[in-house]
Amino acid sequence: MTEVLVKWSAGLLDGAFEGEGQSWFRPDQEPGTSAWVRNTSGAICALEFICPCGCGRLCCVDVTQSEGGDQGWQWDGDLERPTLRPSIWCKVTCGWHGFLQRGVFRG
Ligand SMILES: [Zn+2]
Ligand SMILES: [Zn+2]
């Protein structure tokens, strides 16, 4: 099991390039570098992060604070050291599978 601490960045999509498998890459950023994504009304709707495995991919998961539903991963509301549930699985790309718990990617 590896542990990668979340590091915050202002935004990650600028400077990303599209590569293999229609993935977006930011190999210049450290694994675990993350940014919150806001919708048009300013509410946080997703977390983008540089894949903790070191593949350089920019991954993104939709998040919600409401219980249940299909709107995405359940986020505990902590901006600095977030916990998401359930686990994150980069199934069709690099295969990384792990958890984001209190600001640490564990996989
Ligand atoms: Zn990934
Ligand atoms: Zn990866």
Image (spheres, grey):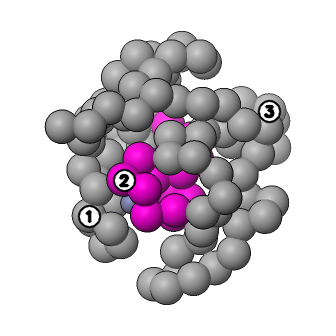
Magenta stretch holds residue 48? yes
- What residue does disc 2 label? 53
Q: Is ligand 2 closer than 8 angstroms to the Cβ of mark 2?
A: yes
Q: Of the residues shown, which amino acid type is indicated by label 1?
A: Gly
Residue 59 in view of the camera? yes
Vertically, is 103 above or below 94?
A: above
Spot occupied by residue 23 in the image (x, y as percentages of width and height): 52, 74
Q: Secondary structure at mark 3?
A: loop
- What residue does disc 1 label? 95
Alpha-carbon neighbours of circle 3 within 10 Å: few (<14), some, or many (≥20)? few
- Residue shown at the point (40%, 16%) measured from the top left: 102
The alpha-carbon separation of the residues under discs 2 and 1 comes to: 9 Å
Q: Secondary structure at mark 1?
A: loop
Vertically, is 5 above or below 93?
A: above
Residue 36 in view of the camera? no
- Residue shown at the point (50%, 47%) measured from the top left: 31
* Magenta highlight: main SS: strand
Front-most of residues 37 and 72:
37
Spot occupied by residue 33 in the image (x, y as percentages of width and height): 59, 40
Q: Of the residues shown, which amino acid type is indicated by label 2?
A: Cys
> What residue range appears in magenta?
47-63
Vertically, is 77 above or below 64?
A: above
Identify the image quadrant of residue 69: top left
